[in-house]
Amino acid sequence: MLERLARRSGSPFADFAVFEEARKGVRDSAGFLSLFASVCRLFRGPEDYAEAAEAVGESLAADGVGYAEIYVSPEIFSRMKLPAEECLAAIAGAFARRPGGCDCRILLDVVRQWGPESAQRVLDLHEKTDHPAVVGFGMGGDENSLPASDFAAVYARARSLGLKTSVHAGEWSGASSVEDALVHLRPDRIDHGIAAARDHELLRRLAEEGTTLCVAPSSNVATGAVASFAAHPLPRLLDAGVRVALSADDPLLFSTTTSAEYAVLRRHFRLGDGDLERLSGNSWSAAFRDRDP
């Protein structure tokens, strides 16, 4: 799919080897965000998004995934001068067809460094369209750009609209990023959150409150959030009783899949079938699947 998009837009990524070289060159958050932006520029209209959504669902189904929640960023459509409403509708329509048999839902994504006004526009779009496939709302982007408190009103509004919430925190920043998110945003779950392992009180709070951390080991190593799998704090999170679910984060950019992340845990963390079943159960219990598409 990447190659097809790249050929249409005249990108060097039409040669997948060029993309692979760029992917392997990612060493930190800046490198990842730059490559992510390059891929976003390949999309030229709603039809491209519909085709990509079909491909995503088929790929997930082929990996054995039956249910998935996928971040979609409407403000990126707008910044590329594409019709946000039509692009979102194209993705929702493709997911409604359950490509490959996978039940794909949408998490509306906002980009932290673009500020709370940009985030409010995403919610404006949701209020206008209210696609049944949309089950949640979250925030990614540069974790160090703006404090969580700037988005408190945004998250309150998302909850008032019936959306479950998540947020990227404690990935490229410290434990305080996770704590600030809990205090100001009150998310239902946290993406990454691995920096919490440095703070015993925070670990205790996460365990007591049952907040699920969606952890992506391959992503964390690729972007330098941790130096290696051996240095990854996932075992400390589990030992503290924190609910952990596995995430492939961005399968294309990190050359992984959901099943590959489970294989990472078996190989590098020596987790057995019982442990992996518990993580899988955490994924299911933390899912935002309340709405029927």
Image: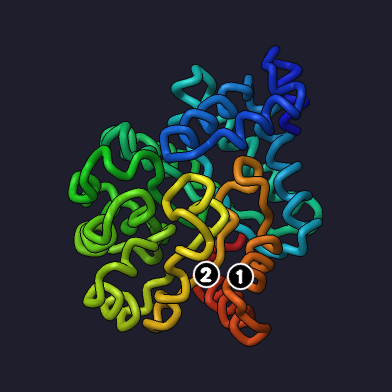
Residue type highlighted by circle 1: Leu
Check disc 1 and report the residue beneath it.
265
Q: Residue at x 49, y 39 (%)?
A: 27
Vertical comparison of 4 with 223: above or below: above
- From where the camera sits, is residue 65 visible? yes
**Element at label 2:** strand
**Element at label 1:** helix
Label 1 or label 2, whichever comes before in sequence order: 2
Left or right for 155, reference 236: left
In three-dimensional space, the C-alpha distance between marks 1 and 2, rounded to whole angstroms, equals 12 Å
Give 19 or 283, whichever is nearer the viewer.
19
Q: Residues within 10 Å of mark 2 (few under 14, many from 20)?
A: many
Q: Residue at x 73, y 54 (%)?
A: 60
**Label for residue 216?**
none
Left or right for 272, reference 187: right
Q: What percent of the width, then of the height, locates residue 134?
A: 52, 51
Q: What percent of the width, then of the height, locates residue 25?
A: 57, 33
